[in-house]
Image: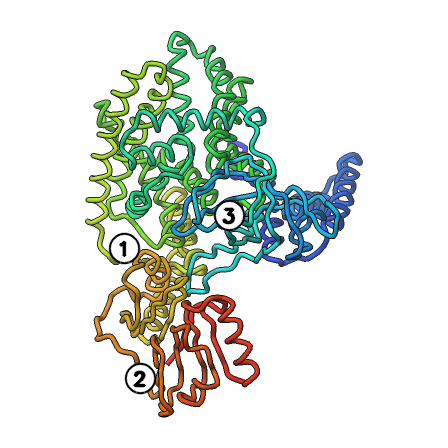
């Protein structure tokens, strides 16, 4: 007798939160990309109507395919518009008290400093939250976040929690306008920060100093832990790394070390994530070593749950940390209430809850990397680990770390290439070492804090920590140098990223499920992907550009021919700033190899000429050029320049103060002279 055929559950049936997460994500994406424009009240009305209809169908117990489809659509509509409304509510622009709705230079603003001022090259960056707005003899409630850059006219006297009066000279946050640069303005907008201002400390008035009594317990704990690490770790680089890894505070993190970790693919150990939560739980479990029976496991989780959340909040509550804490909480509840848990469903549930709290985190690189990394481990770790079955405990531990590293890279590598344009060649080795290193130094950091009441012991642990971190950093720098240069300039465009994931999905389904259709789909997609790469290469080999980058008060001019760049004009005193401006363009233009040429002030651009005028001119002689780049504030008469050079466009360099640049632009407008201002219009790019 034949067996009755059993239906094998689809993954969305074993992980039901996936079906709720998908329409929620779509609603968030629609809001932030302006694919759907409507007030939040309309979305709320639609949700209420859809919910009432769904409730009616459920109560009436109607069955049939048409009713099932209709109820399915109603549920998805509810989740979609919920995502839209949550995003609408989270956007500060929709708040009636947002200070950005009525910017007036004659107003003064009362604001509170929300974080410790961070030091920049020429200024201090102060993050503030608006409290009220003072203007026309009235005081109005105001909300919203902003940045204030205070010139370094003296020591920084502001502290977190201080209330200050600031002028109303707010300006929208803008990008420098360089090709392929990091979209800092968009990043700030996603964090509800739209405005900034630069001013002298003399323009700021302290209204009320921070009251220590109002400092939260979490902040006090964070500051105390930071102080203990500062006391017992003498090496500046080690201290900055430990404060970032253990407490999520990157204020003292050495940027060269961060770049080395990024290039070798282990920057994830700095961000507070699931690995940190796991180590914290291991430490807590060690305190309950005497509870060995499985039926007492819930005690460990019950005790660890509030401590994990305390740690995550103390470490800054980053997207990856919140995701990890939520997953741990869901796992803890399932164990405490003796419920079976599905890791995939826990991940989707954690993502769902995170996005309900902070919908803009969907577009956060940290959230995406964290989510995809955990998803990759859940899907592939057991299968990768089954490739090899060591018997020795040490080899088994090393292989488990290597298998985790391989499993993570399957889905995370395309995203890392897309965002960071690099792929570490020795990712397996360096990740195994990184996991070992992270476990050791985090435990040492916890020990320093816990044993700070015994200074001699804490000092000895601090010395050991410095030695281990210094040794590991040398290994990382050595491995960074091994990677081929081309592996730091990889590019995946939007469509290519999607095609890459289709290929990975198809191959995975074929290897795991033996689905031939998935293999054929992967092969066909790989062909399309290869064609796209060939098209990119053809475009790169036929590119002819002149680019003048916007690098604050400096300028960098380059010729990009084929897949090389040649520097025409530069400032060697600010190499880091110039590198920050030009590296994204070099990467995305595939022109990271330099071709040396002799410095010149006039360039022939396929029959057109461009003159770089870095000094004043005298005399009535005429010298016609097509493009004139001027970088000397003494040259402030565009009419004279037009008579001498007859350019089709004048490019105004960054050496001009803002008031002088504005005056120059107004003179050009009156005399019908085309002008491109680097400070306002961004980089100047010319195809020739």
Which quarter of the figure has residue 15?
top right
Compared to residue 648, the image places residue 516 above or below, namely above
Q: Which residue is mark 2?
A: 604
Q: Which mark is residue 487?
A: 1
Closer to the eye: label 2 or 3: 3
Q: What secondary structure is found at the residue carrying circle 2?
A: strand
| Residue 396 image position (x, y, % from top left) | 25, 27
The residue carrying pointer 2 sits among few (fewer than 14), some (14 to 19) or many (20 or more) residues within 10 Å by Cα, namely few
> The C terminus appears in which quarter of the rendering?
bottom left
User: CA separation, marks 2 and 1?
Assistant: 33 Å
| Residue 505 image position (x, y, % from top left) | 42, 49
Which quarter of the figure has residue 540?
bottom left
Q: Which residue is mark 3?
A: 201
Compared to residue 202, the image places residue 445 above or below, namely above
Name which residue lies at 68% across and 54% down. Answer: 101
Say whether residue 5 is visible: no
């Amino acid at each position: 007798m034949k067996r009755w055929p059993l239906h094998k559950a689809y993954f969305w049936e074993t992980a039901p939160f996936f079906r709720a997460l998908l329409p929620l994500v779509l609603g968030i994406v629609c809001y932030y990309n302006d694919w759907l424009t409507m007030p939040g009240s309309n979305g709320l009305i639609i949700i209420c109507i859809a919910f009432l209809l769904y409730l009616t169908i459920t109560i009436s117990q109607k069955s049939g395919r048409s009713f099932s489809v209709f109820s399915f659509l109603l549920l998805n509509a509810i989740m979609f518009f919920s995502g839209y409304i949550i995003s609408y509510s989270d956007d500060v622009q929709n708040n009636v008290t947002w200070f950005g709705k009525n910017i007036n230079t004659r107003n003064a603003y009362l604001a509170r400093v929300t974080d410790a001022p961070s030091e920049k090259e020429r200024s201090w960056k102060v993050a503030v939250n608006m409290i009220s707005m003072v203007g026309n003899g009235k005081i109005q409630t105001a909300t919203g976040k902003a940045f204030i850059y205070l010139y370094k006219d003296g020591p920084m006297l502001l502290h977190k929690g201080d209330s200050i009066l600031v002028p109303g000279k707010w300006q929208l946050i803008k990008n420098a306008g360089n090709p392929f640069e990091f979209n800092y303005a968009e990043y700030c907008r996603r964090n509800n920060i739209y405005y900034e201002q630069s001013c002298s400390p003399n323009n700021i008035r302290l209204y009320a100093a921070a009251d220590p009594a109002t400092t939260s317990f979490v902040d006090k704990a964070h500051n105390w832990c930071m102080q203990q690490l500062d006391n017992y770790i003498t090496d500046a680089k080690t201290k900055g790394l430990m404060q970032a890894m253990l407490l999520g505070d990157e204020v003292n993190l050495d940027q060269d070390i961060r770049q080395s970790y990024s290039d070798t693919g282990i920057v994830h150990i700095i961000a507070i994530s699931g690995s940190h939560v796991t180590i914290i739980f291991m430490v807590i479990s060690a305190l309950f070593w005497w509870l060995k029976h499985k039926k007492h496991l819930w005690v460990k989780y019950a005790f660890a749950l509030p401590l994990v959340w305390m740690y995550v909040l103390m470490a800054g509550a980053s997207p990856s940390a919140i995701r990890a804490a939520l997953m741990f909480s869901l796992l803890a509840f399932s164990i405490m209430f003796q419920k079976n848990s599905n890791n995939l469903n826990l991940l989707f549930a954690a993502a769902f809850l995170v996005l309900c709290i902070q919908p803009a985190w969907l577009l956060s690189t940290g959230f995406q990397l964290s989510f995809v990394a955990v998803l990759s481990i859940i899907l592939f770790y057991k299968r990768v680990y089954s490739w090899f079955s060591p018997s020795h405990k040490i080899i088994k531990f090393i292989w488990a770390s290597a298998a985790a590293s391989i499993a993570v890279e399957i889905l995370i590598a395309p995203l890392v290439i897309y965002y960071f344009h690099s792929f570490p060649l020795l990712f397996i080795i360096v990740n195994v070492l990184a996991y070992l290193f992270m476990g050791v130094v985090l435990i040492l950091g916890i020990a320093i804090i816990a044993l700070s009441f015994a200074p001699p012991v804490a000092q000895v642990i601090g010395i050991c920590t410095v030695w281990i971190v210094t040794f590991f950093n040398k290994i990382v720098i050595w491995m960074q140098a091994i990677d081929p240069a081309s592996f730091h300039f990889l590019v995946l465009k939007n469509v290519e990223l999607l095609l890459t994931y289709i290929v990975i999905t198809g191959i995975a389904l074929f290897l795991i499920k033996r689905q031939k259709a998935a293999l054929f789909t992967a092969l066909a997609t790989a062909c399309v992907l290869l064609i796209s790469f060939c098209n990119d290469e053809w475009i790169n080999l036929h590119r002819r550009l002149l680019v003048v980058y916007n690098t604050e008060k400096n300028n960098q001019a380059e010729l990009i021919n084929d897949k090389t760049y040649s520097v025409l004009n530069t400032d060697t005193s600010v190499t880091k700033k110039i590198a920050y401006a030009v590296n994204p363009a070099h990467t995305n233009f595939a022109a990271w190899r330099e071709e040396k040429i002799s410095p010149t002030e006039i360039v022939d651009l396929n029959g057109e000429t461009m003159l770089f005028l870095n000094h004043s001119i005298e005399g009535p002689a005429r010298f016609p050029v097509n493009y004139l780049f001027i970088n000397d504030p003494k040259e402030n008469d565009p009419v004279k320049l037009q008579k001498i050079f007859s350019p089709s466009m004048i490019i105004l360099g960054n050496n001009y103060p803002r008031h002088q640049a504005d005056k120059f632009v107004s003179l050009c407008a009156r005399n019908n002279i085309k002008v491109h201002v680097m400070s306002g219009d961004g980089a100047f790019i010319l195809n020739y």
